[in-house]
Image: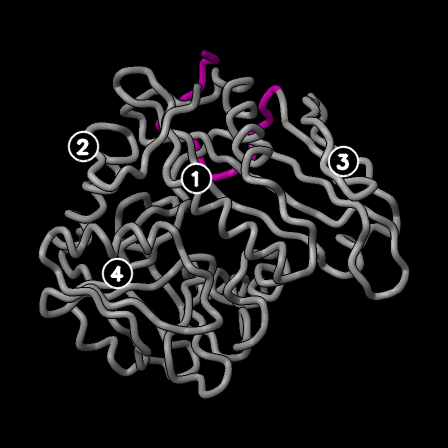
Amino acid sequence: MINLEWSKLPFGYRKTDYNIRCYFRDGKWGELEVSSSEYLNLHISATALHYGQEAFEGMKAYRGKDGKIRLFRWEENFKRMERSAHGVYMQPVPKEIFKEAIDKAVLLNEQYVPPHGTGAALYIRPLLIGSGAEIGVKPANEYLFAVFVTPVGPYFKEGFNPVKIAVVRDSDRAAPLGTGDIKVGGNYASSLRGVIKAKEAGYGSPMYLDSKEKKYIDEIGAANFFAIKDNTYITPKSSSILPSITNMSIMQLAEDMGIKVERRQIDIEELETFDEVGACGTAAIISPIGEIYDIDKDKRYTFCKDGKPGPISKKIYNKLVAIQYGDEPDPHGWVSFVK
C-alpha cells in the first residue's frame, strides 16, 4: 500500500495506476482494456463533446477491518447508469461488463484503497460517452465505457459536521421532463452557476428549488435533501431529482429504526419547522446542515445550534457507514466483495 495521509485526503482527483476501457463498435461491445494513461483519444466530432451524450456514476470501495474490499449496492449504480444511457440515447453497458470493469479497476489499484478507520474510501467513477463522430444531432454509433478510481476523503471539508447552504433562485439545476432524474453531465454543468454563487457568498453548496414555482425544495447541489421532525424522515418527491442510492438506503434504515418515512413536496417555508436537515449522496454520505440562507429573501434558517449533528442524522449515518465498512451486519444484502 502506498504511503498517504489517508485521514487528511480531500475529495479530489489523485492519479492512480490504471483505468479500464471498453468500446462499443460495429454493433457490439469489445473486450476490457487496461490503460495507464489518464487521457482519452477522442474524435473532434464525438457526440459527447457536441451533443452531451455522456453519463457517469459515483461509487466507493471500502476496506474493512478484515482487510477485505467491499462495494455498496453496485447493482443499483448499474441500473441507474442503464437508465441514464437510455435517457440520452446511448448504448447501455451490459451488466457483466460493468461489474467486471469495476472489480478490475479496484483490484489493479488496490494499494490506493484506504485503510480501515481512516474515514477515507476509494471513489469509483464509471463513465459512458458517445465517442462516434457525428455532425448532425443524432446518437453516435460508437461508445466508450471507462472506469477510473481515486482515493478520497469527505465531500465537504467539514466532514460529518454541519455545513452551510445557500438558496439560489436565479438558476435551475434541471426541469421536469428534462434530465434531472438521470446522472448526466449536463445537469452538473447547469448547476455550476448556483455552485459559484453559493461559494462566493461563503456557503458550501446551493439549494435548488423547483423550476416552475420556486417554492418547493429540489436538491442540494449534487446531493439529495432530507429533513427530520416528529420522528419522521422527509425527503422531496420530484421528477427533476436524481434518485440517490444513498437516500434510498437511508430511507430503509430509518424504517428499520422505527422512523416514519415521507417522500413528498417540501415547501421552503416548512424549513423553520424541522428539527434536523441534511444532504445525502455517495460522495457526502450524510452532511448535516447547520444553516440555510435564502439569499434573495435575506432569510436564515439555523439548525444544529450546539454545533453538532442532530441525533437521528447521527444514528442513521453511523449505521450506514458501519454497514459499508463491514463493522455491523448487512441485513439487506447490500454489500458485496471485490475478488
- Answer whether residue 248 is magenta in the image: no
Q: Residues within 10 Å of mark 2 (few under 14, many from 20)?
A: few
Residue at image position (26%, 19%) is: 65
Q: Which residues are magenta?
A: 1-17
Q: Earlier in the sequence, mark 4 or mark 2?
A: 4
Across and down, in percent, residue 243 comes to 42, 60
Residue type at mark 1: give it: Trp
Q: Where the C terminus falls, by quadrant?
A: top left
Q: Which corner quadrant of the image does residue 3 belong to?
A: top left
Residue at image position (53%, 67%) is: 180
What residue is pinned by disc 2?
A: 329
Across and down, in percent, residue 195 comes to 52, 62
Marks 1/3: CA–CA distance:
25 Å
Q: Which mark is residue 40?
A: 3
Element class at badge 1: helix
Number of numbered discs on residues: 4
Q: Is residue 236 left or right of residue 27?
A: left
What residue is pinned by disc 4?
A: 290
Residue type at mark 3: give it: Leu
Marks 3/2: CA–CA distance:
41 Å
Marks 3/4: CA–CA distance:
41 Å
Looking at the image, can residue 117 be seen? yes
Residue at image position (39%, 84%) is: 215
Q: Is residue 263 above or below residue 82?
A: below
